[in-house]
Image (cartoon, grey):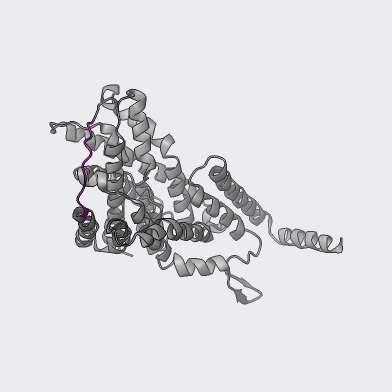
Amino acid sequence: MELVMSFIRAILGSLLSLSGPDAVRMLVMWAIGGILIYLAVKKDMEPTLLLPMGFGAILVNLPLSGAITQVIGGVTEEGALSTLFAAGIANELFPLILFIGIGAMIDFGPLLQNPKLLLFGAAAQFGIFFTLLLTAAIGQAFPGTFTLQDAASVSIIGAADGPTAIFVANYYGTKYMGAILVAAYSYMALVPIIQPPCIRLITTQKERRMRMPYTASDVPKSVRILFPIAVSVIAGLVAPRSVSLVGFLMFGNLLRECGVLDRLSETARDTLANLVTIFLGITVAVKMQADLFLTPQTILIMCLGLFAFVFDTIGGVLFAKFINLFSKNKVNPMIGACGISAFPMSSRVVHKMGLAEDNQNFLLMHATGVNVGGQIASVIAGGLVLNLIGK
């Protein structure tokens, strides 16, 4: 009984040591962590990342949390999550290793059968650069909100690619990393909710019912092997800062396609990707401490992230409609929306929308081709942003 009472007194002492505002901020962050866990468990929204992030948000916002590095009584006490952050995110290691796993998961076959689909992936990055300009303008209008580097970090939410968002945000050392990552992964999970209204808004029923014949053909193994090598070289020449991002992604795909490293490929897409995802999810919570996260800019970042997502989708669809003005073989404009990097969620959304309009309208392979093209384009877009905006 005495042990229990001692335990209760210790908890109450920790809580009472906080001032009123500090206690409120702590409770708010606990609530945010709980919401992320709820969305992961109950709604199955990006559970592999939202659950660790939610739990990590609670850990780093406990009074005098030993999970993060703190100075107590003049003595610096190292925290496990802070150490992991320094070892795996501050040097961009975790996102890059995760890209190897992602590359090993992706089949570029549908894209290689119809290479022009890569153009739709490029067009769907419009929202990134539009959001960059908008965020930079806000920073100019309201000094003290966003620097140009913050604007670059926020804009990458539109890539719909969590590892790229982490890489760019950490490269610029933005203090808004926590808000950026919550926005990026939350909106990725909300793709089935965000994209359909946007697509319907700018397409007609006739366009949504447009059928696209698909003829399956084998892609030569030599092409599959040369493709990741060629993409890495071209990306390196166009956007040198993207070499590590694109290179690790393409290396993972090369493991998949070479045919002689099946065990390494399986390890990369399963064991390695899962392990890194665990550490990545809970470690980024270091940037979700209340004093960093609970700011007016966080709400603004959530709005700007949604803006980037919407305009990425609209940009891809409008580009498809533009191509149809000059093309003999028309494309269903909806596939342009798959140019965002939310693979494979976006392609599934468009496929279901096509079937809802016409139960014989099978768009999955075309949508998948655009979707994997968007994965490449989003990584290159991240590299271009790094090239355009210096530290």
Residue 74 visible here: yes
Task: Work out which residue is located at the far right of the displayed protein and give it.
Answer: 1
Which residue is found at the position 33% from the left and 28% from the top?
354
Quarter of the image that includes the N terminus: bottom right
In the displayed structure, 46 sits above or below 163; it is above
Check if residue 275 falls in the magenta segment: no
Q: Is residue 300 left or right of residue 75?
A: left
In the displayed structure, 367 sits above or below 176; it is above
- Displayed quadrant of residue 231: bottom left
Check if residue 217 falls in the magenta segment: yes
**Who is closer to the viewer here, 321 or 297?**
321
- Displayed quadrant of residue 310: top left
The magenta region covers 212-221
From the image, give the main secondary structure of the stretch colored magenta. Answer: loop
Which residue is found at the position 41% from the left and 39% from the top?
191
Quarter of the image that includes the C terminus: bottom left
Q: Position of residue 97 (x, y in %)?
A: 39, 62
**Who is closer to the viewer here, 68 or 174?**
68
Q: Is residue 262 left or right of residue 46?
A: left
**Who is closer to the viewer here, 309 or 347?**
347
Total marks placed: 0
Residue 147 visible here: no
Which residue is found at the position 34% from the left and 34% from the top?
350
Which residue is found at the position 55% from the left and 65% from the top?
81
Q: Is residue 198 left or right of residue 1?
A: left
